Amino acid sequence: MSSIPTVHASLDRSLEALGTDTPPRLSGGLRLLLATSAGLSVASLYYSQPILGVIGADLRASGGAMGLVPTLSQLGYALGILLLAPLGDRFDRRRLILVKLAVLSGALLLGSLAPGIGPLLAVSLALGLAATVAQDIIPAAAMLAPERHRGKMVGTVMTGLLLGILLSRVVSGVVAARLGWRAVYLFAAGSVAVMGLVAWQRLPRFRPTSTLPYRALLGSLTRLWREHGALRRAALAQGLLAIGFSAFWSTLAVMLRDAPFQLGSEAAGAFGLVGAAGALGAPVAGRLADRLGAEKITRLGAGLTALSFALMFALPWLSSGAGLWLLALSALGFDLGVQVTLVAHQSIVFGLDASARSRLNAVLIVGMFIGMSLGAASGGFLLAAWGWGALTLLATGSALAALAVRLAPGARPRP
């Protein structure tokens, strides 16, 4: 009987180290809940993109005004990562996730009822802020997983998130064509609300890992950046990979529309399915990171990305049919490479400081977001000024730079 208090004390210490009030429950249902919630949340940012023309015609808004819809969503997401994601270290992540899911569902519902472009723009900004719940779910998954399975757990959740991004446009187009654009927002609101109810029932509580006040919490982002070289390398390498990734996807529809392909937007949407196939490699990347070490996987992913981009240099010498196959193969390869590297980078940064996982993830995602913005801005300019070859050079060069970051002596684990 005297051993019982000792056992309870040991269990309490283990739970305190984990940061949760209950033992981790890594059932298949919980993994599915986390992955689906992440995917449906981040998909909210992209439902509008393929139906902007339909929305604009219905609301009698100009093309410039409609262009602000996805812009404000992305801006809200960036602000939310910086201003809201660090709160996961200060408060119970379960509460934050539930609150953001409720806000996200409410914003989507208001979007379905928007009488004009002004309210829809306000909704778009709110969607971006609330969709950062996906960046609360990923650290929560890392905390629920034992260290030896952390990469696998993060990879599973990232698969849901990436599939949400890549398939949201397809779902949006199909629903809008049959039921109208307001049904897209209504469907999204309902799906997020259902996930919120399931999360309320199934998600365990998380003990806060920091007591810093809000201003100090934000200020600690710079301290973490200075203290952890592994975080700086991860953010830099992932940002470099994101440049080519974003440059390709932001210009693909334009490139396919011109000679020699002369294809419509449906073809660009079909390429999203190719990207979705690449995203399915995330769980495999997580398991390999657990088994072989995340550092090796980052180099493998960056190398695959560079090779896949380099293949596109052959495009001018191919027929249109062969060129499409080459583009599909390249897209599959670099999508897989980018996602593999991201999962491995998250596995690395989550292991740096268990009390700051939300903030570490925020820094990594901000670095990636900066690369995405640079790629989108430069991709269109290069394609218009110097053609596809210049864009391919940018994508390949940025991926090789990311590989160089991962191969640098400081990036290798000490013996």
Image (cartoon, rainbow, N blue to C red):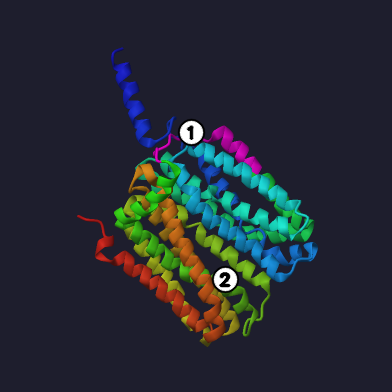
* Residue 358 forms part of the magenta stretch: no
Quarter of the rendering containing residue 345: bottom left
Q: Is residue 258 left or right of residue 241?
A: right
Label whose residue precedes the other's in the sequence (2 or 1) = 1
The residue sitting at the front extreme is 215
Q: In the image, what residue occupies the spot 71% across and 70% down?
A: 63
Residue position for label 1: 205
SS for dot 2: helix
Q: Where is residue 186 in the image (x, y as percent from the top left)?
A: 72, 49
**CA–CA distance in space, label 2 to label 1:** 39 Å
Q: In the image, what residue occupies the spot 41% across and 72% down?
A: 398
Which is nearer the eye, 43 or 149? 43
Q: Give the range drawn in magenta.
A: 193-212
The residue sitting at the left extreme is 415
Which is nearer the eye, 126 or 154? 126
Q: Where is residue 116 in the image (x, y as percent from the top left)?
A: 76, 58
Q: In the image, what residue occupies the spot 47% across and 57% down?
A: 281
Q: Position of residue 377 (x, y in %)?
A: 53, 73
Which is nearer the eye, 30 or 237? 237
Q: In the image, what residue occupies the spot 58% across and 32% down?
A: 201
Query: From what the image shows, is residue 247 above or below residue 43?
Result: below
Viewer can see residue 318: no
Label 2: few (<14), some (14–19) or many (≥20) C-alpha neighbours in 10 Å: some
Residue 250 circle label: 2
- The amino acid at mark 2 is Ser
Label 1: few (<14), some (14–19) or many (≥20) C-alpha neighbours in 10 Å: some
Residue 232 circle label: none
Which is nearer the eye, 213 or 125? 213
Viewer can see residue 308: yes
